[in-house]
Image (spheres, rainbow, N blue to C red):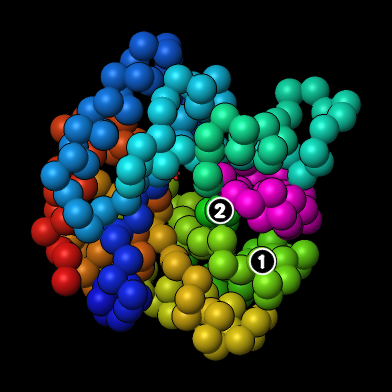
Amino acid sequence: MAKASRKNKQPWLIVANWKMNPSAGGEARALARASKRALLRLHSVSLVLCPPFPYLALIKPEKKVFLGAQDCHFEEQGAFTGSVSPNMLKDLGARYVILGHSERRAAGETSDQVAKKVRAALRTGLTVILCVGEQHRDQEGNYLSSIKDQLKESLIFTERQMLSNLIIAYEPVWAIGGKATVVSHDVHQAVIFLKKVLSELYTADLARSIPILYGGSSNASNTEDILKRGGVAGLLVGSASLSKKEFGTMLTVAESLKK
Ligand code: PGA
């Protein structure tokens, strides 16, 4: 299945979401250096480092190592204290932005705001990593309708011609931060469902072309299972991306799964 989702022999996309870590710029530089070193001899993996805003300027993107941010505003500039616009991110070298992360939604961000951010970031030329995922799983499968609503609402302002820079990250909230173990079967089910919703929104071909990542307690032990059998194009990694050793292992495992 992994092969099917990477038809064009795209490398695995591994996105490191550092969240509000590490606590100082020197450590951020060292972490970025370690991740770049781990990637040196790998050919089938692309890496996106998403540090907190202040560290974006400290990290130089290079071949196969891109910079991403963890959020942005939907306006270009103005009286929005504490906010950062998509253009400012682009100007600092960012190519990607994570939007609609569950930690931001939990802090009050609505799907309407996410939808505006997605449109603004795509218009600026950033690649959007749009996060969706259910709070809980129930036996009856009701969780699927919550993912569907979230996805549809978050893409309400996104037109077909903007989709080439869109990535979806399936992040079940119950699995984030080491709270529960996820298995590839759960991931695969959700990926199939997301593709179905995307094809209802756009077309089946466009839906197939939108990469889907998995995020939520991915680590060195479950990387192989999720990448091999989850039907995903890569991973959105939180806490494990802060451990040089563990993250290095994850990158090596991804490389070993190349076609
Ligand atoms: P986690 O975080 O890998 O620490 O669960 C993933 C995320 O929240 O993006």
Asked whether, in this view, residue 183 is left or right of residue 147, the answer is: left
170 in relation to 237, above or below: below
Question: Which residue occupies 80% across, 38% down?
Answer: 76
Q: Number of marks in the image? A: 2
Q: Is residue 26 visible?
A: yes
Q: Is residue 135 visible?
A: no
Q: Position of residue 163 (x, y in %)?
A: 61, 68
- Label 1 element class: helix
Q: Residue furthest front?
A: 63
In depth, the one of 103 and 237 nearer the eye is: 237
Quickly name the residue at label 2.
Answer: 127
The amino acid on which the numbered mark 1 sits, given as a three-letter code, is Met
Asked whether, in this view, residue 212 is left or right of residue 155, the answer is: left
In depth, the one of 216 and 137 nearer the eye is: 216
Magenta highlight range: 97-126
Q: Quadrant of the N terminus?
A: bottom left
Q: Which mark is residue 29?
A: none
The amino acid on which the numbered mark 2 sits, given as a three-letter code, is Thr
Q: Position of residue 100 (x, y in %)?
A: 62, 50
Q: Which mark is residue 162?
A: 1
119 in relation to 25, above or below: below
Question: Which residue occupies 81% across, 41% down?
Answer: 75
Q: CA distance from mark 2 to mark 1?
A: 10 Å
Among the 4 quarters of the image, the one containing residue 151:
bottom right
